[in-house]
Amino acid sequence: MSQDFNINEWGDKTVGVVFRNTKYAEGHEKVYTYRIFLNMDPKEGDLAVVEKDDTYSFVTIVRIDTAPRLSELAPFRYKWICCIVERRQYNRRIKDEDELILTSAVKAL
């Protein structure tokens, strides 16, 4: 499916992803290019959600492109990252909670 507009004019960002049900070994796994909204700030290793086969799937971001990797001659329509799973804040909260529990246990002694 050739796209009849210049997809590189949108100012898109792209990332490379691998699906969670496969093991990623650099150079040995299929990496798919997905579009990502400009306001997203992906990091390598982030977990993201994509639409696949009329459902949602988890992917791991393994490549952040410095320039969009989009081809107007691609025989398919590029898909978008739906969202990035925000684990950094969650991980900080769990760490804080663990420290509070430890502090409380020490005070109880």
Image: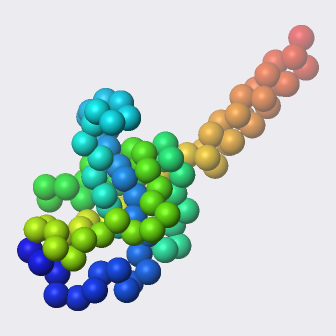
The image position of residue 82, as x and y in percent, is: 36, 63
Residue in the picture at 45% in, 68% down: 67
Q: Is residue 18 above or below residue 25?
A: below
Q: Nearer the viewer, residue 91 or 71?
A: 71
The image position of residue 102, as x and y in percent, is: 79, 22
Q: Is residue 6 above or below residue 34?
A: below
Which quadrant would the N terminus be assigned to in this image? Answer: bottom left
Residue 18, quarter of picture: top left
Q: Is residue 17 above or below residue 2?
A: above
30 displayed left or right of 66? left
Residue in the picture at 24% in, 59% down: 51
Q: Nearer the viewer, residue 84 or 97?
A: 84
Residue 76, quarter of picture: bottom left
Which quadrant would the C terminus be assigned to in this image? Answer: top right
Res 79 visible: yes
Residue in the picture at 31% in, 58% down: 33
Res 82 visible: no
Q: Is residue 68 above or below residue 59?
A: below
52 displayed left or right of 8? left
Residue in the picture at 28% in, 86% down: 6
The image position of residue 21, as x and y in percent, is: 26, 34
Q: Nearer the viewer, residue 104 or 48?
A: 48
